[in-house]
Structure formats: C-alpha cells, structure tokens
Image (cartoon, rainbow, N blue to C red):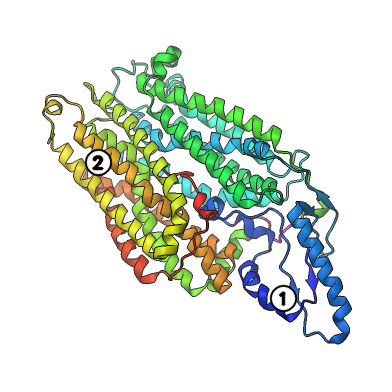
C-alpha cells in the first residue's frame, strides 16, 4: 500500500489534522473502506478507487532537517499533482509505491455514455418494485408471505456489494477491474428476467395446471418456485452490477472531471431508468402490441409483465454493451494488488469488532435511522398492492373482474411511483439549502412527520374505500375505483417522494459529517449505519406475515405500524440527532436509486 511519510511543518500538521481525522481508520485497511456494506455509502458517498494513505507527521524537527523538509514538500506536491491529473499509482504493501501509469483523458460525452448501464439496471429495478409483489400473489403466494421474498434485498445489500467491491478492487482481468463484474452481473440479470417473465409458462411445463389462465384461480407452485429463484438472482445481480458501476464512474471521472460530475451523471441515469421503468410497468398494452406474449398460462396482465421485462432484457444488453465498449479501463498490475488478511470476510469482522470505536453522536443517528426504516419498508413493499386492493377493490386471483381491477390498480400504482420518483429528484437538489437553513435534524424530523401523515392517510383512505363509500355518483354506480380516491392515492404517492429524498440523503450525510468532525472513520461509521438499515428491513420482512395473519388480509395493519414508527422517529430525530447542517451538493444528487 502506497504511503507518503513526510517530515511536515507544524502549520501543515495543524491544517491537515481535521482532514486526516476523517480519513484515518485505526481498524480497516485504506482500500477496504471503499466497500464496507453500506447502501447509503454506495449511493451517496462514493470515493476514488485508488487512495493514498494520509501523510503521517514526523516527530519534532530541528534546523538541520530544513533541506529534507523542502524535498519532502516537493514530493508531496508531485504526488498531489499526479492525483489531480489522473495518474494511477501502483500500490505495494511495502510502502515503496510501484509503477504509475497515466489514465487516458475521457470526454464528458463518453463519460456520460460509459455510465449507461446504471440506467438499464434502474429500469429493471423499477419494474421489480412496482410489479413483482402483486404478480407473486397471482401465482398463489399468500399476501402473508410476500414479504419473505423481499428478504433477499437487505441480504444482498449487506453481503454482495462489499464482497464484489473487495474483489473488483483487486481484479487483474485484461478488460479492467470493474467491467468483468458488470458483465457477469448483467448476464445473470438477463437470465433472471427471463425466469421471472416466463415463470408461468415454465411452471405449466413443469407440472402446473393445464387449465386456461382466464378461468383458473388456484395456486401454481412450480411457477411460484421459478419466480422466487429468478427474483433472488435478480436482486443479487443488481447489487453485483451497481457497486462496480458506481466505482468505475468514480475511476473515470477522477482528475479531469471530478467526483461531483461522476455522481451527477450516475444519478441522472438512475432517474432516467426509473422513469422509463415505471412507465413500462404502467403500460397495459404490451399484450396488444406483442400478441405472442399471451399463452394458455399467461393472460393479459401476465403478458404485460412479460413484455415489460423483455424490454428490460433488451435495454440491459444495449446499455451493458455501450458501457463495456466506452469505459476504457486499464489492467491492474498483479504486483500492485493489496490483499487484506482474511480476504473479503475480514471486512465484516473488522466492522463488528470496531463498534466500540464509534463516535458517541453516531449512536443517536443509528437509532433514528433504524426506526425510520421500520416506518418505510411497509410502503416500499406494498405500495402498488395497496392501490390494487384498497383503492381499486381488486383481488390478485379474483373472479368476475376482480383480477382485472387489481391489475389496473397495480398499473395505476406504477404511475404513482413515477410521480414519487420525480418528486424525489427535485427534492434532492433542494436539500442542501434546506439543511443549511433548518439543520439536518429538523429536516429529518419533518420528513418523518410527513411519512406519518401520509401513511395514516393511506390507512384511512383504504379503510373508507373498502367500506364502499364513494364520493362521486358516477363511481357509485360501478365496481371500479372512485375518481376522488384514486386522485388522492396518486397525490400520496407523489408527496411521499419528498421525505424519501431525505431518507436516501440526510442519514448518510449526517454520518459523514460526524465521522469528519469526531474522527471515527467514514468507512466504519457508514458500515455500521448500514446495519441500522438492514436489520429493520429484515425485521419487517419476517414479521409482516404474522401481523397480516393476526389482523386479516390487507395492507392497513402494516401501514399503520409504519405510521407509528414514523411518528416515533420524528421525535427521536429532534432529541437524539446532533445539530448538523452538512448535506453536500454531491450527496444530494441521489435519485430514487432503488426504492421509489
């Protein structure tokens, strides 16, 4: 690992003390801090792929060291210039450095196109969020067990990205460090998309019912099994691609353009992919445009899902090809690879052993983050299902038009998520000014109060709608949804994008500022923050089924519990969080990268 040991003057030591306190980490190797298991860190606080250890001040100097001091200052200036110009320093464990090679300059247009794969990934991710919970119920998976299929999300975020990041940092492939993992992940995504889209047809061939899908209302367990396998593979593959894609963007943007430009481009592709994905999920005419999608096992709604996922397959292939072609990575010299003792597992060992080194202020951030995510996961999991059941009065396996109403509600929910994504993006760019004016803890508390109000509105609106009350006369004469209720539901979906922008930006920014001010190490701090994100998701995923069984089918119990946690987290934010104002413009460029 390259280290610069200089005899630095005392004034330089004083100036750099704050910076070194934020970079230093007494536990983790420098390179391994990039890929600690932190979803917020991956989305908001990416760093360069190559690092220099912070300058280590020498002991007190006497007058005879002036010549050595000048020489060391010149070496430091040259090293800094090399970093700014994009020189990649070979790293060796003996601290002697290694061969350095200059990265070829990359234009802004090429940089923009080289990040295209992130848009393709986000397109499929938007389809997954909006369509797959409802689709799983049409295959026979009970509403009580749908949450169990989503356990793969927190597991993949906590395990897959750090491990992939560790090995991509050390990959010596001829096509570069990141591109092999992007290629492998995209191949798995393509296979997963085919498994999900054609799960009903595959299940029929494996032994599911031969009855026409238009009349059959039972369970199709073979299709459900194929779907679950494809769903888990898709989630793990998404995490395999997103980490290296973001790291590669940081690699390419370093020096000439800077990390802020790279993050802005990455976020723009996420926004574009999400918007297109929700539009595709809301489209009800795939089966008309491509009639061959309909089969005996796959009727209109299934064919629409199949068409949307086939477009995701095509988009992944195109965006992956463009990225692999234009992202000119250089091969990493095997002599310059730094292997941490214990391999990738050492990341997790270091993380849990280092909990005692947390800055005291981080304990409050962890508590507020955990309770905040307890309030959010029910909405993330059941949003379109709530629209189909409570607002459109449909059933996934219902007869007499109930299934059609449910599917129409799911598509309308996808439109609502599109509005949510737009609101999230606009709010993200306003957050720095809001946090500087009101402080981060006030903004965080207000956002949680908004979640409380909106989730409560969903519960009340759903209960009133399910009891048959319809404000408009025209709607009261039909079995479909009331226009007033549908408009109110879409407004809720749009407004909830505002606090969701806070969820994806402020916790990470507050943790980064605490690490900078108190010297706990950003890698460690953000890695522990991710535990506060993952554990609540696992808890809700495991408990949603029993809660559903205790209170009956429907989404009101889970959403109501989420509202209670939102209110608690709003109070905790004011009581426990420090008075920080730090949300940078870079961290606020986060777009709905996975949950809206």
Which residue is label 1 attached to?
12
Q: Earlier in the sequence, mark 1 or mark 2?
A: 1
Point out the stretch of residues depicted in magenta: 338-343
Is residue 338 visible in the rendered image? The answer is no
User: Percent from the top left, x then y, of residue 61?
Assistant: 81, 84
Q: Is residue 551 visible?
A: yes
383 up-or-down from 158: above or below? above
Q: Is 220 placed left or right of 363 in the picture?
A: left
Q: How many neighbours does mark 2 have within 10 angstroms: few (below 14), some (14-19), or many (20 or more)?
A: some
Relative height, residue 330 to residue 94 (above, below): above
The quarter of the rendered structure image containing the C terminus is top left
Q: Is residue 402 left or right of residue 250?
A: left
Q: Quadrant for residue 93, please give it.
A: bottom right
- Classify the position of the N terminus by image quarter: bottom right
Is residue 508 shown in magenta? no
The residue that label 2 is drawn on is 554
Tally of numbered discs: 2
> Residue at position x 71%, y 61% from top?
341
Q: Are marks 1 and 2 in contact (CB under 8 Å)?
A: no
């Amino acid at each position: 690992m390259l280290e610069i040991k200089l005899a630095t003057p005392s004034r330089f030591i004083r100036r750099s003390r704050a910076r070194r306190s934020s970079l230093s980490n007494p536990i983790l190797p420098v390179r391994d801090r990039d890929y600690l298991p932190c979803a917020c860190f991956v989305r908001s606080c990416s760093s360069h792929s190559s690092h220099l250890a912070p300058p280590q001040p020498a002991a007190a100097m006497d007058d005879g060291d002036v010549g050595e001091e000048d020489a060391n200052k010149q070496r430091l200036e040259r090293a800094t210039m090399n970093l700014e110009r994009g020189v990649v320093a070979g790293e060796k464990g003996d601290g002697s450095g290694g061969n350095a090679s200059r990265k070829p300059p990359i234009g802004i247009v090429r940089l923009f196109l080289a990040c295209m794969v992130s848009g393709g990934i986000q397109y499929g991710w938007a389809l997954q969020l909006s369509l797959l919970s409802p689709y799983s119920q049409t295959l026979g998976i009970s509403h009580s067990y749908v949450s169990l299929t989503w356990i793969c999300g927190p597991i993949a975020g906590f395990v897959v990205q750090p491990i992939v990041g560790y090995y991509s940092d050390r990959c010596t492939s001829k096509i570069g460090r990141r591109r092999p993992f992007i290629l492998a992940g995209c191949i798995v995504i393509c296979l997963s998309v085919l498994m999900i889209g054609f799960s009903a047809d595959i299940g029929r061939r494996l032994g599911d019912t031969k009855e026409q899908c238009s009349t059959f209302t039972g369970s199709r367990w073979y299709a459900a099994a194929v779907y679950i396998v494809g769903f888990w593979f898709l989630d793990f593959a998404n995490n395999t691609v997103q980490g290296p894609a973001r790291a590669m963007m940081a690699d390419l943007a370093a020096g000439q353009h800077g990390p802020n430009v790279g993050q802005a481009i990455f976020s723009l592709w996420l926004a574009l992919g999400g918007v297109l994905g929700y539009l595709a999920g809301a489209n009800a005419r795939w089966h008309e445009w491509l009639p061959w999608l309909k089969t005996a096992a796959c009727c209109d709604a299934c064919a629409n899902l199949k068409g949307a996922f086939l477009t995701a397959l095509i988009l992944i292939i195109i965006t992956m090809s463009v990225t692999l072609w234009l992202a000119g990575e250089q091969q990493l010299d095997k002599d310059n690879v730094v292997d941490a003792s214990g391999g990738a597992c050492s990341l997790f060992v270091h993380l849990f052993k280092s909990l005692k080194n947390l800055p005291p202020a981080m304990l409050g951030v962890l508590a507020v983050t955990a309770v905040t995510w307890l309030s959010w996961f029910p909405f993330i999991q059941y949003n379109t299902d709530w629209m189909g059941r409570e607002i459109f009065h449909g059933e996934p396996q219902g007869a007499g038009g109930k299934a059609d109403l449910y599917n129409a509600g799911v598509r309308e929910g996808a439109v609502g998520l599109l509005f949510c994504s737009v609101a999230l993006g606009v709010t993200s760019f306003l957050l720095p000014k809001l946090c500087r004016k009101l402080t981060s803890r006030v903004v965080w508390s207000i956002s949680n109060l908004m979640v409380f109000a909106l989730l409560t509105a969903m519960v009340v609106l759903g209960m009133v709608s399910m009891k048959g009350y319809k404000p408009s006369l025209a709607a009261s004469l039909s079995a479909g949804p009331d226009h007033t209720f549908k408009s109110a539901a879409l407004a809720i979906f749009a407004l909830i994008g505002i606090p969701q922008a806070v969820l994806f930006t402020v916790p990470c920014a507050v943790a980064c500022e605490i690490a900078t001010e108190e010297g706990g190490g950003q890698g460690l701090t953000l890695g522990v923050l991710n535990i506060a994100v993952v554990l609540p998701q696992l808890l809700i995923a495991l408990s949603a089924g029993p809660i559903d069984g205790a209170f009956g089918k429907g989404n009101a119990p889970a959403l109501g519990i989420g509202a209670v946690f939102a209110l608690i987290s709003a109070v905790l934010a004011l009581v426990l969080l420090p008075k920080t104002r730090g949300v940078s413009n870079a961290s606020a460029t986060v777009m709905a990268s996975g949950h809206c």
